[in-house]
Amino acid sequence: MVATRPKRSSLDPAPPSKPGDVIDAHTHLFTVGLLTEMLESMPNPPARFREGLKNRKWGRRGTDVLPDLTPEQAACWYLERLEAAGVSRAVVMSVAPDNQWTRDFLVAAKGHVLALCNIDPFDPSGPELLEREVAVGFRGVKLYPVNRCYRLSDPACRPFFDKVAELGVAVTIHYGVTVDPTGDLRYADPLDLSPVARDYPDTPFVIAHFGAGWLQQVLQLAYQCKNVCVDSSGTNNWMDYHVPKMTLPEVFERALTAMGPERVLFGTDSGTTAPYRTWIAYAQRRTLEEMGLSDHDRDLILRGNAVRIFKIDE
């Protein structure tokens, strides 16, 4: 896929959301400019990153074309992709810490696309960076314990979570299986979050991809900690490896029974090196309709929970 130049040159500020809108609470953003800055900031970037940027190819197979757009062009292009898919806004999970290209993108997006920043919770300067990122518009932080091989229960993370609580922002976390070849499943269990979610009860914690194979542990954690939520993002192909066999309606049913519609967020895990994942959005929305949920409950999952947790209309 090659990114075409957007029809717009700039965006008007996003209006407040309304019932019936769809907000994708878990997406990604990869561009030449963003990744160039990221790799330049890394002392020893992985060879696959250097090769991918050199060839302008990204993605799991290394064959998807990286968009080469300015932040302003990318913001317009991103919104046009969302509109074509019937989605009004999206929340991007940042992959690069302290990235000026992403900040410029957020300014240009004017609330149509929002983002969670990327910070190492063990970094002593992390709390200060988080405060600066929130000040420029980030709505929270995305953490990758499986990919970065750390445990959020480690006391060394407490200063970071103190700042998260002080700022009143949300945290999305990737637990479970990952396509990252450097990931380590010893760090995949969401139950590691238990003491953190317990001790910061006013902080929303969103476990991505229904826990990516650790659904039971997510639901157990959510029973203990009412501030734990899930998003539905991705192909959810972890179901192929789950015993006993599960279907997408069964996954939604388990999550909704255990957590209620107030703690489930819609997402697709769409990136920008391939078309927007309309088939995932369709399958999830059709599943919710066929489950017989009320309009109110469907709106919570597709819009309202993201608005509340990420303070989208503020």
Image (cartoon, rainbow, N blue to C red):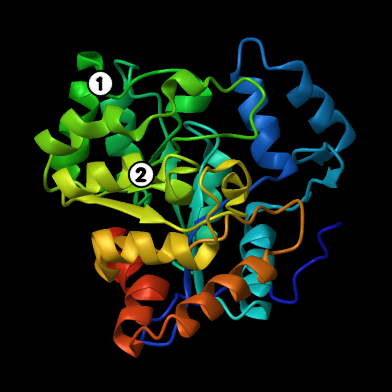
Tell me the number on the disc at residue 216. 2
Crowding near the residue tagged with mark 2, few <14, some 14–19, many ≥20 C-alpha atoms within 10 Å: some
Question: Is residue 169 positioned above or below 47 on the image?
Answer: below
Question: Is residue 87 positioned above or below 154 on the image?
Answer: below
Res 16 visible: no
Residue in view at x 59 percent, y 21 percent:
41
Quadrant of the rendered structure where residue 309 is? bottom left
Please identify the residue farthest to the top as the structure is shown.
44
Q: Secondary structure at mark 1?
A: helix
The kind of residue on which mark 2 rests is Gln
The kind of residue on which mark 1 rests is Cys
Choose between 283 and 306: the one closer to the eye.
283
Q: Is residue 110 left or right of residue 179?
A: left
Q: Which residue is mark 1?
A: 157
Residue in view at x 31 percent, y 35 percent:
130
Q: Secondary structure at mark 2?
A: helix
Residue 131 picture location, percent across and down: 27, 37
Picture quarter with the N terminus:
bottom right
Choose between 74 and 203: the one closer to the eye.
203
Residue 294 picture location, percent across and down: 33, 88
